[in-house]
Image (cartoon, rainbow, N blue to C red):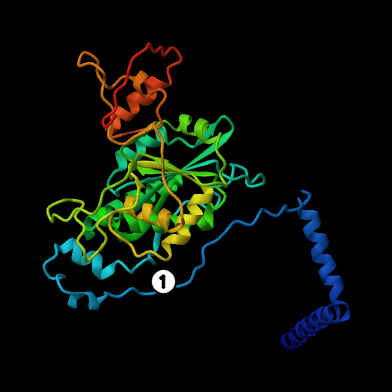
C-alpha cells in the first residue's frame, strides 16, 4: 500500500481551503472584522469609559535655541580697562549677555492654586535671591516665613533665584543638590550663569522675564535676600490695602548717594561702568515690595537700560526711567534693630511683631523668631524700639 502521497495531497487541500476562507472573509466585509474586534474589546473591558475634561492651558516658554553671546572685545581698547580689577573687566566684557539657559524651573502651574481647575492669581510671590550653596537657608525659609500657604485668603508662593557655582567640580555637586530641591519642592529657578555679587542684576532681569511668562498676574512681589527675616503675614495685611494695578515700590529708601570709586570696596563702580556721580533713589536690596503694575514698568525699562553691577541701584534706575519713585516703609529695616537699653536684648519678638522685614538673620535665628511670633500667648508691653538711622 502506498499511503504517503495521498496523505500529503489531503493536507495541501485542507491548507488551501482554509486560506481561501480567510481571504473571503477579509475581502467580503472589512467592517465585520472591525465590529468583531470592537465587540471583543467591549466584552473584555466592562468598565465604562470616562469622558476626559480638558485641563486649562498653561503658559509655556519658547523652546527657541539660545543665541550665543560672545565677548565684547571692543571694550578692551577703552582707556582704563586694563587697570580695572578682574571682576570689573569680566563684567564689561559680558554685561550685554542676557540670554541664559534655565537649568531648573518650577512647574508651569506654580502660580495657580493646587487644583488646576480653579486658576487664580497669586497674591504675594516671594522671589528670594539665594546662592547655590545656601541649602540650609533655603530649608529654614521653607519652614518659616517662606511657607507656601494662604494668609487671610491670600495665596503666597515661593521661588529661589539661583545661578551656578564658578568652580566646575563644585558646580556638579551643587547642581545635583538644586535638582533634588527642585524635584521635592518645585521652588528653584536656576540659570546657567555664574552666581556672583556682580551678577545679581542679571538675576533680577532674568526673573522679570520669567515672571512675565509664568506668573504675570501675581498681585505683588517680594524681592529679597535669603538672610532676612520677613514677616510675610504682616506683608499680606499691608498689601491687602493696596491696589496691585497702581504704582507701589516700598522698602528702605536710599537717596543722595553715588557710585563708590575706591577699588578695594565691594561696591566699587568705576566711571567705565557708570559715568554719573549720583544714583537715583532706590530701595536697599535686602528686601522690598512691588505691585504688579510697577513690576511690568521695571521690566519694560530694563530692556532699554544697560546692566550695572549693583542690582538695587539698577532697579532704581528702571523706576526713574519709568517716571516712578520708591517709597519708604518704616516696617522694612535692612540695617537691623537695636534695643533701647543694654539690659534688653534686641532679639525680642515684641520688637519684630509689627515689622515687615529685618536684615540680617542667621538661619537658626530665623527659626527661633518665627516660632516666637507664632506663639498664641505672646504679650508685649510698651517697649520702645530704636532703629539705626532714626
Count of all numbered marks drawn on residues in the image:
1
- Which sits in the foreground, 268 or 68? 268
Dot 1 falls on a residue whose secondary structure is loop
Residue at 57% in and 29% down:
152
**Front residue (pair 382, 205):** 382
The quarter in which the C terminus is drawn is top left
Residue 254 occupies which quadrant of the picture? top left
Residue 32 in view in this figure: yes
Estimate the x, y position of residue 217 in percent, counting from the top left: 57, 50
Height in image: 14 above or below 235? below
Q: Is residue 306 left or right of residue 34?
A: left
**Image position, residue 163 (x, y; %):** 32, 55
Q: From the viewer's perspective, is 254 left or right of 105? A: left
Image quadrant assignment for residue 70: bottom left
Is residue 176 in sight in this rendering?
no
Q: Is residue 92 above or below residue 184?
A: below
Q: Position of residue 364 (x, y in %)?
A: 29, 29
Q: Is residue 19 toward the left or the right of residue 140 in the image?
A: right
Q: Residue at x 29, y 33 (%)?
A: 363
For the point 34% across and 55% down, the residue is 314
Give the residue pinned by disc 1: 66
Q: Position of residue 268 (x, y in %)?
A: 19, 55
Q: Residues within 10 Å of mark 1 (few under 14, many from 20)?
A: few
In the image, 74 versus 181, the foreground residue is 74
Amino acid at each position: 500500500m502506498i499511503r504517503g502521497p495521498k496523505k500529503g495531497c489531503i493536507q495541501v487541500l485542507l491548507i488551501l481551503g482554509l486560506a481561501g476562507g480567510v481571504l473571503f472573509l477579509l475581502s467580503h466585509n472589512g467592517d465585520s472584522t472591525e465590529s468583531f474586534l470592537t465587540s471583543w474589546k467591549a466584552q473584555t473591558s466592562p468598565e465604562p469609559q470616562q469622558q476626559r475634561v480638558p485641563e486649562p492651558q498653561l503658559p509655556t516658554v519658547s523652546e527657541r535655541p539660545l543665541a550665543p553671546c560672545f565677548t565684547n572685545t571692543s571694550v578692551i581698547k577703552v582707556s582704563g580697562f586694563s587697570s580695572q580689577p578682574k571682576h570689573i573687566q569680566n563684567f564689561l566684557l559680558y554685561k550685554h549677555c542676557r540670554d541664559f539657559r534655565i537649568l531648573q524651573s518650577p512647574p508651569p502651574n506654580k502660580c495657580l492654586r493646587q487644583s488646576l481647575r480653579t486658576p487664580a492669581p497669586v497674591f504675594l510671590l516671594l522671589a528670594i535671591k539665594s546662592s547655590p550653596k545656601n541649602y540650609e537657608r533655603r530649608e529654614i525659609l521653607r519652614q518659616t516665613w517662606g511657607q507656601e500657604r494662604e494668609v487671610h485668603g491670600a495665596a503666597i508662593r515661593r521661588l529661589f533665584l539661583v545661578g551656578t557655582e564658578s568652580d566646575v567640580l563644585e558646580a556638579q555637586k551643587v547642581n545635583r543638590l538644586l535638582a533634588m530641591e527642585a524635584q521635592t519642592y518645585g521652588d528653584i529657578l536656576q540659570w546657567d550663569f555664574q552666581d556672583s555679587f556682580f551678577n545679581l542684576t542679571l538675576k533680577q532681569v532674568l526673573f522679570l522675564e520669567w515672571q512675565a511668562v509664568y506668573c504675570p498676574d501675581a498681585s505683588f512681589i517680594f524681592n529679597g535676600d535669603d538672610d532676612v527675616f520677613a514677616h510675610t503675614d504682616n506683608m499680606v495685611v499691608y498689601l491687602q490695602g493696596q491696589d496691585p494695578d497702581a504704582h507701589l515700590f516700598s522698602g528702605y529708601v536710599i537717596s543722595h548717594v553715588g557710585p563708590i570709586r575706591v577699588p578695594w570696596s565691594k561696591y566699587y563702580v568705576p566711571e567705565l561702568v557708570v559715568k554719573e556721580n549720583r544714583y537715583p533713589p532706590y530701595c536697599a536690596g535686602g528686601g522690598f515690595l512691588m505691585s504688579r503694575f510697577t513690576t511690568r514698568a521695571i521690566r519694560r525699562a530694563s530692556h532699554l537700560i544697560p546692566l550695572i553691577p549693583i542690582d538695587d541701584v539698577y532697579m532704581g534706575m528702571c523706576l526713574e526711567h519709568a517716571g516712578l519713585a520708591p517709597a519708604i516703609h518704616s516696617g522694612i529695616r535692612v540695617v537691623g534693630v537695636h534695643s533701647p537699653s543694654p539690659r534688653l536684648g534686641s532679639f525680642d519678638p515684641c520688637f519684630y511683631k509689627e515689622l515687615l522685614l529685618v536684615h540680617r538673620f542667621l538661619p537658626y535665628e530665623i527659626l527661633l523668631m518665627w516660632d516666637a511670633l507664632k506663639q498664641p500667648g505672646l504679650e508685649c508691653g510698651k517697649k520702645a524700639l530704636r532703629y539705626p538711622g532714626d
